[in-house]
Amino acid sequence: MATNLTTSCCCSKDKVNPELNKPKQDINLSKAIIVGLPGLILWYIIYKQLKPLSYYISYSLFHLEQGSHLGEAIQFFFYDTPKVMMLLTLIVFAIGILRSFFTQERTRKYLVGKRETAGNVMAALLGIVTPFCSCSAVPLFIGFVQAGVPLGVTFSFLIAAPMVNEIALVLLYGLLGWKIAALYLSTGLLIAMVAGWIIGRLHLEHWVADWVQELRTGEALVIEEQLTWAERIAQGRAAVHEIVGKVWIYVIVGIGVGAAIHGYVPEGFMAQIMGKDAWWSVPVAVVIGIPMYANAAGIIPIVEALLGKGAALGTVLAFMMSVIALSLPEMVILRNVLKLKLIAVFIAVVGSGILFIGFLFNLII
């Protein structure tokens, strides 16, 4: 929790002494471990039983024919729905606690005064763990500009925050393995760093909305309040309630689409239209992905099904990145602070990076 002060005053009396909270934090952390460890073990036991349970429901309870289109689709749905929801809940809870250490104000403070090359790297890395959604793009952008963060560094953050989505990263690891998750992480960070650096080199500050440029006041003073572990855990629970409560319907729809692809799309069909030999599949995937509005948790089951049916990894990654990083709703929101020319440059630079990644992985994998 942080408070911005625009006046230069002595605030020593308002600062919280970390030593005062130390015993309370230790007690709360111990209780959290004692309660949380058995819960985590129970979560793992249930998670490992999801696949046999999905087979029982599909083929024993519903008496569907094993290997049939409907049977495979239903089994996929009953396996992926609880699996993704369990992973999502655990991830969001952990990330909610982690994010209590990385407020938006603290992130802005870290980036102030950083030169563009080092700043692009730091901004992209901070974008992974800092709270961000499309609705917060405008206040974040204004805050960075107001604090004097370079435009290119700001864009590295705005690109990495939605693209290298930590929820998508852990879901990819849980559903498709660490190699694809690592590829997603490294390529997303690379695009954010390079795209931000290019935008910074172009010196396009004059394409930021005039009223935003007038807000430059220099670095704001940020005072951080020391949180107890009980408060951090409460933030984790609140994140689960807020995020899972909002995205569950997208997850269900995404799994439904994935189940239909898994059950009814013939083996090799996706290889014909989204395979390595179809060179046009990468740009088409990007063009289709940009106007879509889907969150990372909802798109991952579709990615899983597409890869399972023979779609090329580069094409699928390009599709997923365009949906997450270049969604039309986010462009509409950013229109409040950016002129159309800068939005066009942003889409062109990031889109080119996504196309490059798609073609590269289709070539080498």
Image (tube, rainbow, N blue to C red):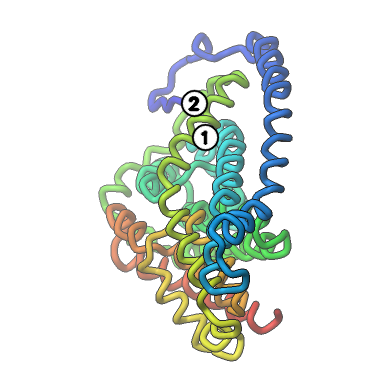
Query: What numbered label is drawn on residue 13?
Result: none
Q: Horizontal and vertical percent for residue 221?
A: 47, 28
Look at the numbered disc 1 and give the secondary structure of its residue: loop
Q: Horizontal and vertical percent for residue 328?
A: 34, 63
Image quadrant occupied by the C terminus: bottom right
**Is residue 74 visible in this depiction of the protein?**
yes
Using the image as rendered, state which of residue 267 and residue 190 is in the foreground.
267
Q: Which residue is drawn at 51% across and 23% down?
A: 223
What's the distance in space between the residues labelled 2 and 1, CA to CA? 7 Å
Q: Which residue is drawn at 60% across and 82% down?
A: 267
Image marks 2 and 1: residues in contact by CB distance under 8 Å: yes
Residue located beneath label 2 in the image: 1
Amino acid type shown at disc 2:
Met
Using the image as rendered, state which of residue 134 and residue 157 is in the foreground.
134
Residue located beneath label 1 in the image: 103
Q: How crowded is mark 1: few (under 14 residues within 10 Å), some or many (20 or more)?
A: some
